[in-house]
């Protein structure tokens, strides 16, 4: 049986990437809590700020699409380090912007680097996860959430201490560059080991070759209490999860559903992108509308209404910390299917509840239900057996990010036609559709377990 404890360099790479994810969340939170101060200094109106934030979002999408091919060409480690360093430096530009023009330029650069980092660090997370004997993707996203919490607290503390935004952003930039310098050499390059090639990693999703050979007509996944015991030391090539950057013959991609479509986008990538769109749309709705929904529905004060988002974000973070164990035990499909059903139940409670505790419970269920889905989608996108892993991820990430932006806007438009609480039916339906299509996140080498 293969060793289940990764070598020290692999564990160090995991820790280094934890810090990068945390840095991304921290820098994003530092910017968010300083938006009022920056807008006051630059003199931009709220409407102008809205246009500038839309411009930043467009730049982020452009960064995502550029990052995929670049990561495939130069490696996710190189691009993650470059994008994280760039994001740290662009934060300095936001801190020193003095006009609408300079703020727009800084937001363009910030958005582009942020989008590139989102794709490249998730591509690197796929590399690190392949070198681990168990799923770890959700933990990376948990560190992003923890970094965001730390950044919000640090930013608020800096403002309370009467630090200028110049000082706070300069310290954040220097700290970010230091983290990148520390972590970049310790991340994994294209030659990283792939334990799944030897020991049937993530067996809840992908039974070992020996078992599959004995069940050639099995239409569903089967669980195995000890999946590594009958794994062949030389698995068949078609069941091997390829190391990052390795090419796969075109006929193999066609057999697994990874063959390119009319415009080079496979049906699998498109379906994963749609699921990412729905998941992040629901997350965006919760982030932007939860407090307002609670206030409008139950007519509570603003302070009480804030508990809706607090409930959502707390269970989201806790869920991400535990989602990897659930994925390792039951498989990616189960995390997405049952998670989205749980989120759908949460939105249903929000729709019908006239009581504060039940409504808060609904938002908490949404948080824990949504917590593990996106990491599973990104893991699936990065393991399609394609020579363009990061490009596949960038396409899925791009569609997901559009959902994150579109969800709150869709709810806003619908409030012209119906009460805000009634619009929660939109993410509810989206979650039910995700549960129905959850089989898309199963590895291309194995059908999903019912």
Image (spheres, rainbow, N blue to C red):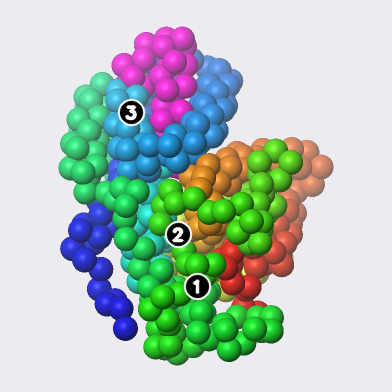
Callouts 1 and 2 close, C-beta under 8 Å: no
Quadrant for the N terminus in the image: bottom left
Which numbered disc, 3 or 1, marks the residue that appears first in the sequence? 3
- Vertically, is 397 above or below 224? above
Q: Is residue 157 magenta?
A: no
* Viewer-side residue, 139 vs 163: 139
Numbered mark located on residue 306 in the image: none
The residue positioned 62% from the left and 87% from the top of the image is 215
The residue positioned 53% from the left and 74% from the top of the image is 205
The x and y percentages for residue 230 are 43, 88
Left or right: 421, with 303 as reference point:
right
Please give the range of residues in magenta. Answer: 93-119
The residue positioned 53% from the left and 86% from the top of the image is 211
Q: Secondary structure at mark 2?
A: loop
Mark 1 and mark 2: Cα distance apart in space: 12 Å
Numbered mark located on residue 242 in the image: 2
Q: Is residue 117 magenta?
A: yes
For label 1, the residue is 236
């Amino acid at each position: 049986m293969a060793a289940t404890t990764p070598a020290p360099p692999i564990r160090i790479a995991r820790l280094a990437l934890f810090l990068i994810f945390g840095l991304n969340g921290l820098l994003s939170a530092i910017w968010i809590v300083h938006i009022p101060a920056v807008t006051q200094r630059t003199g931009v109106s709220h409407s102008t700020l809205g246009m500038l934030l839309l411009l930043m979002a467009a730049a982020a999408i452009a960064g995502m699409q550029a990052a995929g091919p670049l990561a495939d060409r130069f490696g996710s480690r190189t691009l993650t380090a470059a994008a994280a360093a760039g994001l740290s430096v662009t934060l300095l530009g936001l801190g020193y912007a003095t006009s609408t023009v300079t703020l727009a330029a800084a937001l363009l650069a910030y958005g582009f680097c942020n989008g590139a980092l989102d794709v490249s660090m998730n591509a690197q997370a796929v590399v690190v996860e392949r070198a681990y004997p168990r799923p770890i993707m959700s933990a990376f996203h948990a560190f992003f959430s923890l970094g965001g919490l730390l950044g919000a607290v640090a930013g608020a503390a800096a403002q309370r201490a009467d630090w200028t935004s110049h000082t706070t952003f300069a310290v954040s930039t220097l700290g970010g560059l230091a983290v990148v310098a520390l972590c970049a050499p310790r991340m994994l390059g294209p030659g990283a080991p792939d334990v799944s090639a030897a020991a049937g990693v993530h067996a809840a999703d992908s039974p070992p070759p020996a078992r599959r050979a004995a069940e050639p007509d099995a239409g569903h996944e089967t669980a195995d209490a000890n999946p590594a015991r009958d794994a062949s030391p030389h698995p068949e090539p078609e069941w091997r999860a390829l190391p990052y950057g390795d090419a796969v013959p075109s006929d193999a991609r066609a057999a697994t559903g990874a063959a390119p479509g009319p415009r080079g986008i496979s049906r699998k990538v498109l379906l994963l992108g749609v699921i990412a769109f729905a998941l992040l749309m629901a997350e965006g709705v919760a982030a932007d509308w939860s407090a307002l929904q609670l206030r409008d529905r139950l007519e509570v004060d603003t302070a009480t209404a804030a508990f809706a988002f607090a409930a959502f974000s707390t269970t989201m973070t806790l869920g991400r910390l535990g989602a990897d164990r659930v994925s390792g035990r039951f498989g990616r499909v189960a995390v997405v299917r049952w998670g989205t059903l749980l989120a759908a139940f949460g939105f249903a409670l929000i729709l019908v509840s006239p009581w504060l505790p039940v409504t808060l419970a609904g938002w908490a269920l949404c948080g824990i239900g949504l917590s593990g889905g996106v990491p599973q989608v990104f893991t699936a996108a990065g393991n399609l057996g394609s020579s363009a892993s990061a490009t596949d991820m960038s396409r899925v990430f791009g569609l997901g990010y559009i959902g994150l932006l579109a969800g709150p806007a869709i709810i806003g438009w619908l409030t012209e036609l119906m009460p805000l609480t009634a619009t929660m039916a939109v993410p509810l339906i989206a979650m039910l559709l995700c549960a129905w299509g959850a089989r898309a996140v199963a590895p291309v080498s194995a059908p999903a377990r019912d």
